[in-house]
Amino acid sequence: MSIDFTDKVAIVTGAGGGLGRAYALELARRGAKVVVNDLGGARDGTGASDAAAQVVQEIEAAGGEAMANGASVTEYEQMEAMVAEAKDRWGGVHILINNAGVLRDKSFAKMTPQDFEFVVRVHLLGSAYATKACWETMREQSYGRILMTSSSTGLFGNFGQANYGAAKLGLAGLTKTLYLEGAKNNIKVNTLAPVAGTRMTEDLFPEQAFKLFSPENVVPAALYLVSEDAPTNAIVGAGAGGYHSAWVVMNDAVFLPEGERTVEGFAAHWDRISAQENLHAPQSGAEQSGAILKAMQAAGAA
Ligand code: NAI
C-alpha cells in the first residue's frame, strides 16, 4: 500500500530545519504542495532568517512544489494570511502539521514569567492560531488532517522545562477536543511526541545517539497521522525507528459509602483509588462521569 499526497495542500510550521524540514521534504516527494513556514529564528526564538526559502529550494530542486512563508505562528493575522495565500495559489488546505517550537529551559525557580509566557505562546497559542486559521476551510472541504507536536516532557515531565511541558500537554488537550468537534467534517486530529537529534536537542544527545535519532525516523509516524486513512485522537511517540502509542487513562472509580466520604475515608482507600489496574482510555470527558456512575451502580447506590 503506497501512501500518496497528490492534490493535497499541506502547511508545515517551523519547517525551516529539523523535523519540520524532514516532513516537508517527504510530503512534497509524495505529491503534496507544501507551505514551508518558518520564522527562521534561533532556538530561543530570537532573530530571523530565510530558512523556509532554503527548504523550498530543496523541494523544487527535487521536482516538488512548495512556497515559503516567513510568518510567526504567534500572530493570528499572519496565520490567516498564510492560509489565504495557500488557498489562492492551490485552492485549499488539507493538512496542517503544527511543528514550530522554541526552548527557554530553566528550573522553575529561575524561570521568569516572560520565559514561561513566550514558550506557551509559541507552542500552544501558535498551534491553536494556525489551526484556527485553517479550521473553516477544512470544514468547508469536509477534509482536514491536523497534527499537534507534543513531547515526552508534556506527557511525562522533564526537569527544567515547566513552560515547555505545560504547553506540550496543552497540545494533547487541544487534540482531544478538536477531534470531537472536527469528526462530522472529516477532520482528524492527532498528537505526536517525537524524539530526534536536531538543534533543539543537540546539547542533550551524545554524538552517536544524535545520529541514531535522525529526524527521518520520525517522518513515517508524522505522515501516516496526516494521511487519508489516519486514525484520530491518537498520541504517538516516534524516535530512532521505535514507535509507540500513549494514552490518558483512568482506573475504575472506587465508590465510597456516604459515611466514608471524609478526608480520612479517602486516605484509607488511597491504595485502591491510585491502583494502576483496569486502566481504560476515555475518548471524551463525558466518559469520566459515566465511569463514576457505573461504579455507583455496581455499588448498588443508584
Ligand atoms: P528546531 O528548532 O529545528 O525546529 C523548530 C522550528 O520552529 C525552527 O526552525 C524555528 O525557526 C521554528 N519557529 C520557532 N518559532 C517560530 C514561530 N513563532 N513561527 C514560525 N516558526 C517558528 O527543532 P525540532 O527538534 O525540529 O522541533 C520541532 C518540533 O518538535 C518542536 O515543536 C519541538 O518542541 C518538538 N519536539 C522535538 C523533540 C526532539 O527530540 N527534537 C522532542 C519533542 C518535541
Image (spheres, rainbow, N blue to C red):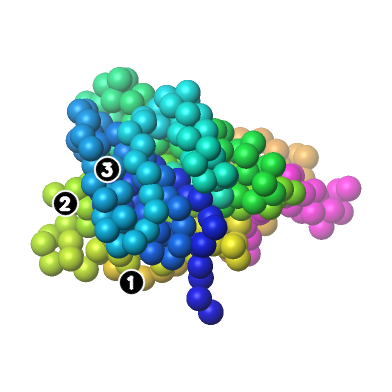
Q: Which mark is residue 53?
A: 3
Please report the residue visible at 53 percent of the width from the left and 79 percent of the height from the top. Answer: 1
Instruction: Say which label, 3 or 1, has the lower sequence index.
Output: 3
Specify few, some or many for label 3: CA neighbours under 10 Å numbering under 14, 14-19, or 20 or more: many
Q: Secondary structure at mark 3?
A: helix
Q: Which mark is residue 241?
A: 1
Query: Given the image, on which type of amino acid does mark 3 rest?
Result: Ala
Q: Secondary structure at mark 2?
A: loop
Residue 203: x percent and y percent? 14, 49
Residue 275 appearing in the image: no
Instruction: Say which label, 1 or 2, has the lower sequence index.
Output: 2
Q: CA distance from mark 2 to mark 3?
A: 23 Å
226 and 178: which is toward the camera? 226
Q: Is residue 171 above or below residue 201?
A: above
The residue that disc 2 covers is: 202
Query: Given the image, on which type of amino acid does mark 1 rest?
Result: Gly
Question: Left or right: where does residue 97 sit relative to residue 278?
Answer: left
Q: CA distance from mark 1 to mark 2?
A: 18 Å
253 and 46: which is toward the camera? 46
Please report the residue visible at 48 percent of the width from the left and 35 percent of the height from the top. Answer: 85
Please report the residue visible at 57 percent of the width from the left and 44 percent of the height from the top. Answer: 91
Q: Secondary structure at mark 1?
A: loop
Q: Is residue 297 above or below residue 119?
A: below
Foreground tag (3 vs 1):
3
Instruction: Say which label, 2 or 3, has the lower sequence index.
Output: 3
Q: CA distance from mark 3 to mark 1?
A: 29 Å
